[in-house]
Image: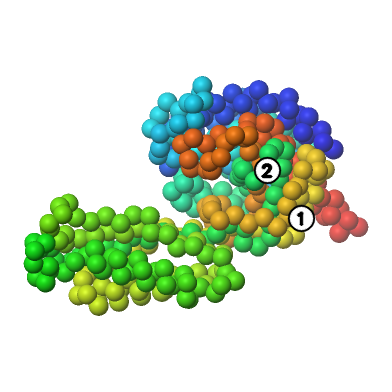
Amino acid sequence: MTEFLEQAKRLEDFMVSSRRYLHQHAELGCDLPKTASFVKEKLKEIGLEPKEICQSGILAEIKGARPGKTILLRADMDALPMEEESGLPFHTRTNAAHTCGHDLHTSMLLGAAKILYDNRDTLCGTVKLMFQPGEEVGIGARNMIDAGILENPRVDAAFGMHVMFGWKAPAFAYGSGFTTSFLDEFEITIKGVGCHGAMPHLGIDPINVGFHIYTAYQALVAREMPPKETASLTIGRFTSGTRSNVMPDRAVMEGTMRTYDRALRERMLKRLEEVAKHCGEMFHADVTFRWLSNIPAIESNPELSEEFAGCIREYVGDFIKSSACTMTFSDDFGFVAEKVPSSFFMVGCKVDGCEVQHHNPKVLFDESVLVYGAAAYAGCAHGWLLQKFVKSLRDTD
């Protein structure tokens, strides 16, 4: 039934134009007035009644002709705070850039909304469309959950996707269990005692304390993380001082830890705080450790992932490249996956000659991915709901 793929191909111009508008009007975090307004307008044109259930968080529902379960389809909408250097004719006009591909995700889901609405007579149950802000800042999914997107009716399964560069389009990949990493971001503020650089014994050097924290953290990775586990610990910011001959009184470090194992994560969360605290005590500095964000890994339900893979094969085509895919990045769809059975797929969009990755100002995405992504969103929703409807009939016989 690759009919959905054919329907998506007929919507390609609509999705490309939508993507390019969103790309030119990229916005940040949860403050997406133009993006949200555009999405609501397009959903209304399709025939839906979108609701902004929290700041820039849009929910639309498609009810099928037959009763059944409820599935949620999610797309993120926010961009990144950077200058674009792609050279594209539809270059961003704002101080933000869609260098992660969220403009593609949003456009795919708009296309899927049109396909599902046009096929609502054969739809069994309800499809909730989740157009989410604030993924890059890790709060958008949680805000929409708090606003009730998983209730009334209760969501039985959730499906999300992200573009990737592992394969050219058409290509899909998925995994079972934790398929993205836990992300834990932290800030360490070190308060020492400033003094003249010629008399360091009269001060407490916060840079020295920070250096010892940094090297101790590297030892945590090398000596306390099991070799068979996948984890990374990065200090991305270390700032202090203003003059070469003055010992500063303050230093600030910021970093991230990414893990896949829940027990390892909990142990390392504790150790990060302990190491920072004891390094400060060792040099008589005042160290304050603060968590900036804690985003759960996306746990893809094995059974659900296989069901969605089957739907893609039936409704889109035999484009599955891997069933054991894990990603080192994080995504706040993990908050949804904590609440309801979920699955997260990657969809290939590599451009020949583009050697950079996501979050790079020069990154390019193959727009042909829009057709396959829209067909996958629609096919997984329609196919999964049909499977559950048929099963319910059998169970009542």
- Other-residue count near label 1 (Cα within 10 Å), few / some / many at <14 / 14–19 / ≥20: some
Say which of marks 1 and 2 sits in front: 2
Q: Secondary structure at mark 1?
A: helix
| Residue that numbered label 2 is attached to | 167
Picture coordinates of residue 154, whole percent (x, y): 64, 53
Compared with 382, 142 (above or below) is below
Residue at image mark 1: 306
Identify the residue at image location x=58%, y=42%. Answer: 75
Q: Quadrant of residue 210?
A: bottom left
Quarter of the figure with the C terminus: bottom right
Viewer-nearest residue: 41 or 76 = 76
Q: Residue 379's x, y, as percent?
A: 75, 41
Q: Earlier in the sequence, mark 1 or mark 2?
A: 2
* Mark 1: amino acid: Glu
How many circles with numbers are drawn on the protein? 2
Residue in the foreground of this view, choosing between 144 and 65 = 144
Residue at mark 1 to residue at mark 2: CA–CA distance: 20 Å
Q: Is residue 122 left or right of residue 298?
A: right
What's the residue at 38%, 32% (across, down)? 95
Say if 98 sits above or below 42 in the image. below
Amino acid residing under circle 2: Trp
From this view, report whether residue 363 is shown above or below residue 290: above
How many other residues sit within 10 Å of disc 2, few (<14), some (14-19) or many (≥20)?
A: some
Name the residue furthest right. Answer: 397
Q: Position of residue 105 (x, y in %)?
A: 59, 38
Specify whether residue 139 is in view. yes
Describe residue 115's horizontal placement relative to residue 396 as left or right.
left
